[in-house]
Image (cartoon, helix red, strand yellow):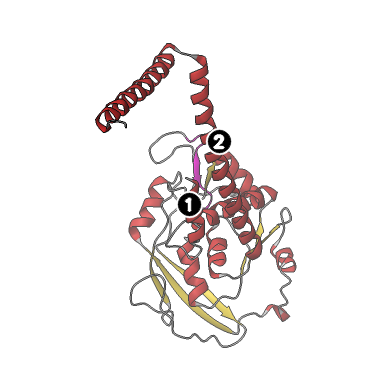
């Protein structure tokens, strides 16, 4: 019969031997790694590379899938066409297939007064390189073939304001240095985008407001006078737009607002470069809006996919 006490002692000895062997093996691995054992280093490097590769592949697949979704969203609502070089206003009308008998379009007219926030207007004025003034109040003429009537609706801009009144106040201009919202391009690229529509204004623009000579690679807003996406969302919402036709598109905000409102946007761009870059910009904006919880384009599944991939 086996003595239980002796059995416990024997098990303790065996456990001690096993622990010693494990410890010696761990110490040997550490010494080998410290001495630069190629086999140990290669094994660790391969494991790390495999993990990083799997992570990179999964993240790249998520990005590709949602960028494709953004591309399809833009394709659904946006149609761009290139304007003929040096085209006249009459040619533009023909392109738009506007059937205006005797050129009489005005049947019902309503003026909308747009008042900008002074602080944001000054912010844009300070970084401009010429001295043309920007009006703090502008007029927008709404012209219809029939009597223009509106159902009361609360505005997106301004508290306690509705579309029944003909003033839209508190309109903020975007920060010209924030490239997430403001479409900025190098001066040389901007000149190519504007094409033959570019006109000199305000005299010489050799120096910036800080007195520093501007380089052709310095970035500036594509449109100094362009309105924000929120402004265009307000117009589409308050005046029940079914579609938007833009004869002079510069930045991407009007198109993005139409995508958010799920209405068609048609625009005549200056040239092929303008059309290509505007399409690319819109796809990137929509992709970013998928991840913005405050946006009408927010996609929770997109955010969840990135969280898993990261």
Residue nearest the observer in this picture, 26 or 268: 26
Give the x, y percent position of residue 151: 47, 86
Q: Is residue 34 above or below residue 228?
A: above
Q: Is residue 237 magenta?
A: no
Residue nearest the observer in this picture, 277 or 36: 36
Residue at horizontal 36 percent and vertical 56 percent from the top:
120
Q: Secondary structure at mark 2?
A: helix
Give the x, y percent position of residue 37: 48, 14
Distance from the alpha carbon under mark 2 to that under mark 1: 35 Å
Residue, disc 1:
182
In this rendering, position of residue 75 left or right of residue 208: right
Residue nearest the observer in this picture, 27 or 191: 27
Give the x, y percent position of residue 174: 42, 55
In this rendering, position of residue 186 left or right of residue 114: right
In this rendering, position of residue 178 left or right of residue 259: left
Q: Residue furthest top?
A: 35
Q: Residue 53 shows which numbered tag?
A: 2
Q: Is residue 15 above or below residue 122?
A: above
Magenta stretch secondary structure, dominant? loop
Q: Quadrant of residue 282?
A: bottom right
Give the x, y percent position of residue 213: 46, 33
In this rendering, position of residue 247 left or right of residue 136: right
Q: Is residue 218 magenta?
A: yes
Say whether disc 2 or disc 1 marks the residue closer to the N-terminus: 2
Crowdedness near tag 1: few (<14), some (14–19) or many (≥20) residues, C-alpha within 10 Å: many
Q: Is residue 225 visible?
A: no
Q: Quadrant of residue 35?
A: top left
Q: Secondary structure at mark 1?
A: loop
Residue at horizontal 48 percent and vertical 50 percent from the top:
308
Indicate the quadrant containing the N terminus: top left, top right, bottom left or bottom right. top left
Tell me the magenta residue range.
214-223
Crowdedness near tag 2: few (<14), some (14–19) or many (≥20) residues, C-alpha within 10 Å: few
């Amino acid at each position: 019969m086996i003595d239980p006490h002796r059995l416990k002692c024997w098990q303790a000895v065996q456990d001690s031997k096993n622990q010693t062997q494990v410890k010696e093996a761990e110490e040997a691995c550490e010494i080998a790694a410290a001495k630069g054992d190629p086999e140990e280093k290669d094994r660790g490097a391969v494991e790390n590379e495999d993990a990083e590769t799997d992570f990179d592949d999964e993240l790249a697949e998520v990005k590709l899938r949602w960028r494709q979704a953004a591309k399809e969203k833009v394709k659904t609502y946006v149609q761009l066409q290139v304007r003929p070089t040096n085209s006249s206003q009459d040619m533009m009308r023909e392109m738009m297939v506007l059937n205006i008998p005797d050129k009489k379009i005005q049947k019902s007219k309503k003026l909308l007064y747009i008042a900008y926030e002074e602080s944001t207007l000054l912010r844009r004025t300070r970084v401009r390189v010429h001295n043309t003034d920007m009006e703090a109040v502008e007029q927008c003429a709404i012209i219809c073939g029939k009597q223009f009537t509106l159902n009361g609706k609360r505005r997106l801009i301004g508290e306690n304001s509705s579309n029944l009144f003909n003033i839209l106040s508190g309109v903020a201009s975007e920060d010209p240095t924030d490239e997430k919202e403001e479409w900025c391009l190098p001066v040389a690229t901007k000149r190519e985008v504007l094409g033959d529509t570019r006109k000199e204004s305000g005299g010489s623009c050799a120096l910036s407001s800080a007195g520093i000579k501007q380089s052709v690679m310095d970035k500036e807003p594509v449109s100094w006078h362009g309105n924000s996406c929120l402004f265009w969302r307000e117009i589409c919402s308050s005046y029940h737009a079914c579609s938007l036709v833009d004869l002079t598109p510069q930045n991407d905000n009007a198109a993005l607002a139409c995508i958010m409102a799920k209405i068609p946007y048609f625009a005549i761009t200056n040239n092929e470069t303008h059309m290509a870059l505007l399409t690319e910009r819109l796809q990137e904006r929509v992709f970013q809006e998928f991840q913005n919880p405050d946006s009408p384009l927010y996609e929770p599944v997109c955010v969840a996919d990135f969280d898993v991939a990261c």
